[in-house]
Amino acid sequence: MAPEPGAIAVKICGLTDPEAVAAVAAAGADFAGFVFYPASPRAVSGARAAALSRGLPASIRRVGLFVAPTEAQVAAVLAELPLDVLQLYGIAQPAGWRARFGRAVWTAHGIGATADLPADAAGADALVIEARAPAGATRPGGNAAVFDWALLRGWRAPAPWLLAGGLTPDNVAAAIVATGARAVDVSSGVEREIGRKDPDLVYAFLIRARAAAALIVRQEPAPDV
């Protein structure tokens, strides 16, 4: 489901507890993300994500984040929780994963220079554009790092995309205006402590992101599943 034309789609990622799920549901986010990467402080099991997911209305799409997974690992999670979207790091041939699992596939791309911007979606349904992981990072994304949004000027996105990386309620409106993003993805920027979301920050992020829609010049589609 895509947001209304002209609206901003919002994904809140890294949900770990019922309070966070309740805030996401009440705020009316478009996507709720669960992390299935053990190195992340926001990692949950398939069973835990399934239990949390029961607190979400059907209108909020469930996204599972995986890093270089095997098909067996994804299948095990899907047996517990019927995800709507697979957000994948470190995989080749996104279309093959979509064909195998019958789910939309988003691929993540770390940006440090214009050369890092993807010119081809390679079969992915959407792209997550974030900062390149810093040296020594233990995970490829979710490092609360902001990249230079000016790098996106003139980029012709080959697919719908989400802006991520260091977004907060304080900077999300500026990020949307600077990049023309139609969808944004946040995790640590709405936390009170590592791995635990702050409901007030979740609400503020949603309100400020959607209020920025009227200021966008570029009109690109948000991801649809």
Image: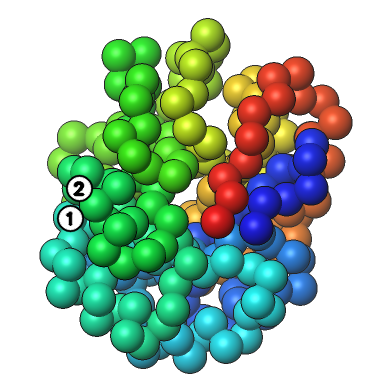
Local SS, label 1: loop
Distance CA(mark 1)–CA(mark 2): 6 Å
The one of 172 and 217 positioned closer to us in this rendering:
217
Q: Residue furthest front?
A: 99
Residue drawn at x 55%, y 56% as measured from the top left: 225
Looking at the image, residue 121 lies above or below residue 17: above
Q: Give yes or no for contact between labels 1 and 2 (Cβ–Cβ under 8 Å).
A: yes
> Which of marks 2 and 1 precedes in the sequence?
1
> In which image quadrant can residue 49 be found?
bottom left
Q: How many numbered badges does the structure rendering display?
A: 2
| Foreground of the two, 159 or 52 | 159
Name which residue type carries label 2.
Ile
Q: Quadrant of residue 79?
A: bottom left
In the displayed structure, would residue 146 be above or below residue 96? above
Up-down: is 178 above or below 84? above
Q: Nearer the viewer, mark 1 or mark 2?
A: 2
Q: Residue at x 25, y 71 (%)?
A: 74
Q: Which secondary structure, mark 2?
A: loop
Which numbered circle lies on residue 91? 2
- Is 220 left or right of 62, judged from the image as shown? right
Find disc 1 in the rendering and name its residue: 68
* Residue at x 17%, y 67% (from the top left corner): 71
Give the numbered dot on residue 207: none
In the image, is 27 to the left or to the right of 128?
right
Q: Position of residue 95 (x, y in %)?
A: 30, 47
Looking at the picture, how far across and down is residue 128, in whole percent? 43, 41
In the figure, is residue 182 to the left or right of 94? right
Circle 1 crowding by C-alpha within 10 Å: few under 14, some 14–19, many from 20: few
102 or 155: nearer the viewer: 102
**Residue 104 percent location from the top left of the image:** 43, 56
